[in-house]
Amino acid sequence: MQNNNNNRTVKTASNQDEVTTDYFHGAAIIDDRGNETKITEEMIQDSLKAILKACNPPADD
């Protein structure tokens, strides 16, 4: 699985213990090798634009 940057490491002043918390609460695509790719808002917007373009081709002049 790929390492993602949604983990946060928190150090407390009293004991300097490290706690890692995963804040990712979204969706991801997992390929046949198990690599995880997060689905971003940009990916969704691009996909919706492509669908709209395919459904509404420009009018011929």
Image (cartoon, rainbow, N blue to C red):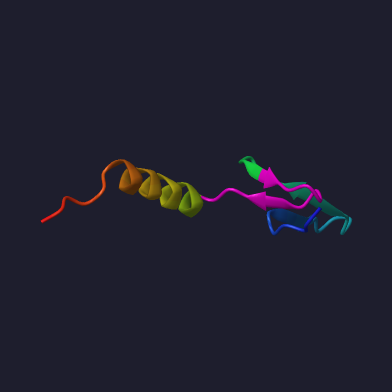
Quadrant position of residue 16: bottom right
Please provide percent x and percent y for residue 47. 45, 48
Observer able to see residue 23: no
Q: Pick whichever, 44 or 60, lies toward us.
A: 60
Q: Position of residue 38 (x, y in %)?
A: 63, 50
Q: Is residue 38 magenta?
A: yes
Write the residue at 73% across / 54% down. 7
The answer to whether residue 4 is seen in the rendering is: yes
Image point 38% across, 44% down: which residue? 51
- The residue nearer to you, when weighing 56 against 37, is 56
The quarter of the displayed image where residue 8 is located: bottom right
Q: Is residue 43 magenta?
A: no
Q: Is residue 44 left or right of residue 61?
A: right
In percent of width and height, residue 1 lies at 81, 53
Residue 61 on image: x %, y %: 10, 56
Looking at the image, which residue sits at the far front? 60
Q: Foreground residue, 35 or 58? A: 58
**Residues drawn in magenta:** 29-40
Which residue is at a point 62% across and 41% down the rendered structure image? 27
